[in-house]
């Protein structure tokens, strides 16, 4: 983060990174905060199975992931769940059936830049497994796993691994 040195307002090489979440310009009044971005992850559950995807891009290419993604401006977390599940899997869901489970902080490293996120975990239960139309640019596979045999160590993000350890503890 400290490699950004030019102020976007005045153009001087006077941008200062505070080492945490703030840039300020010593020449003008410019201040930029690099706060948490909201992201959702949806546990799609059918009886005693959970649906995971396999990532087809960095970070974590080839690793397991929950469907979800970053919230867009003026979008609720539930709207993000609906949009992301439609984009990634081609499915429509009823947002009133989403159940928020917990939140976890995360650091999402993308193109050599760390983004602090607040991951919001939801559960969505379905009666039957469903056909998916994968967005292969983001997701290379969709896999149902037995809750008892969930390969937590193969999951891409630390926040999701932490979440699953807590979630599975609640189910047993």
Image (spheres, helix red, strand yellow):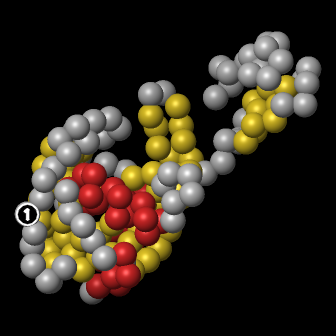
Badge 1 is on which residue? Answer: 131
Left or right: where 147 falls relative to 105: left
Q: In the figure, residue 83 lies in which quadrant?
A: bottom left
Q: Which residue lies at the image location 29% right of the left edge and 85% below the top edge?
A: 171
Q: Which residue lies at the image location 53% right of the left edge and 37% below the top edge?
A: 114
Q: Nearer the viewer, residue 11 or 49?
A: 11
Mark 1: secondary structure: loop
Left or right: where 35 falls relative to 10: left
Q: Can see residue 167?
A: no
Q: Which residue lies at the image location 31% right of the left edge and 76% below the top edge?
A: 94
Q: Quadrant of the N terminus?
A: top right
Q: Residues within 10 Å of mark 1 (few under 14, many from 20)?
A: few
Relative to 164, residue 155 above or below: above
Q: Percent position (x, y) of residue 34?
A: 67, 41
Relative to 59, residue 129 above or below: below
Q: In the figure, residue 169 lies in which quadrant?
A: bottom left
Q: Which residue lies at the image location 43% right of the left edge and 65% below the top edge?
A: 79
Q: In the figure, residue 122 lies in which quadrant?
A: bottom left
Q: Percent position (x, y) of residue 92?
A: 24, 67
Q: Nearer the viewer, residue 43 or 29?
A: 29
Q: Nearer the viewer, residue 143 or 28?
A: 28
Left or right: where 115 falls relative to 54: right
Q: Nearer the viewer, residue 43 or 130?
A: 130
Q: Can see residue 71?
A: yes
Relative to 23, residue 122 above or below: below
Q: Percent position (x, y) of residue 172?
A: 27, 86
Q: Percent position (x, y) of residue 95?
A: 36, 75
């Amino acid at each position: 983060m400290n490699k950004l040195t030019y102020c976007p307002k005045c153009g001087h090489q006077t941008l200062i990174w505070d080492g945490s979440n703030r840039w300020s310009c010593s020449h003008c009044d410019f201040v930029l905060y690099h706060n948490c971005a909201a992201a959702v992850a949806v546990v799609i559950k059918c009886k005693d199975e959970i649906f995971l995807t396999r990532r087809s891009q960095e970070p974590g290419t080839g690793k397991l992931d929950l469907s979800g993604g970053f919230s867009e401006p003026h979008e609720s977390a539930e709207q993000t769940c609906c949009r992301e599940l439609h984009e990634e899997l081609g499915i429509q869901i009823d947002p009133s059936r989403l159940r928020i489970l917990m939140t976890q902080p995360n650091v999402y490293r993308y193109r050599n830049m760390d983004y602090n996120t607040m991951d919001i975990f939801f559960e969505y239960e379905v009666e039957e497994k469903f056909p998916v139309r994968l967005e292969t640019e983001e997701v290379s596979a969709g896999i149902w796993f037995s809750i008892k045999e969930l390969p937590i160590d193969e999951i891409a993000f630390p926040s999701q691994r932490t979440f699953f350890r807590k979630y599975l503890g609640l189910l047993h």
